[in-house]
Amino acid sequence: MATEPEIIDARGLKCPLPVLKMEKRLAALPPGAVFVVLATDPMAKVDIPLHCKQQGHDYAIETDGDVMRFTITRG
């Protein structure tokens, strides 16, 4: 049975806080680990993918209203 990925709730936080929370969690996870970041700051749509690309992590983004859901896989 698959477990749900951990969720980091960064809704209502302005950048760079969502990215900083994501970086802190990434540092504690092994390669291949998956977690989710929820964010509402429009800059997160730019900052989180950019950080993932620069650091070699995979990501997927879904939006539901003003909430963005980033599924991050540590590279």
Image (tube, helix red, strand yellow):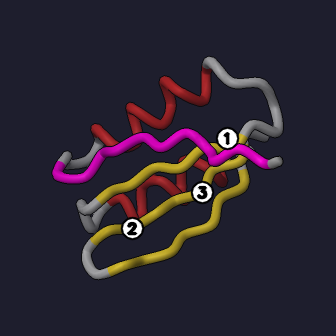
Q: CA distance from mark 1 to mark 3?
A: 15 Å
Residue marked by disc 2: 68
Q: Amino acid at mark 2?
A: Met
Label 3 Cα neighbours within 10 Å, binned few <14 / some 14-19 / many ≥20: some
Query: What residue lies at 29% left-to-right and 42% top-to-bottom?
Result: 16
Q: Earlier in the sequence, mark 1 or mark 3?
A: 1
**Disc number placed over residue 23 in the picture, else none:** none
Q: Which mark is residue 55?
A: 1
Residue 18 falls left or right of residue 36: left
Q: Can residue 54 be spotted in the picture?
A: no
Residue 36 visible in rendering: yes
Report the Cα–Cα distance between label 2 and label 3.
Answer: 10 Å
Which residue is rendered at x = 25% and y = 52% of the image? 11
Q: How many labels were placed on the picture?
A: 3
The x, y position of residue 55, in whole percent, is 67, 41
* Whether residue 63 is situated above or below residue 3 in the rendered picture: below
Relative side of 54 to 45, left or right:
right
In the rendered view of the protein, which quadrant contains the C terminus? top right
Which range of residues does the magenta coloring cover? 2-12
- Position of residue 26 relative to residue 5, above or below, is above
Tell me the mark number nearer the camera, choosing from 1 and 3: 3
In the rendered image, residue 74, in percent from the top left (x then y), is placed at 72, 39
Q: Amino acid at mark 3?
A: Thr
Q: Residue at x 39, y 67 (%)?
A: 68
Residue 61 in the image: state x and y as whole percent: 54, 70
Report which residue position mark 3 lands on.
71
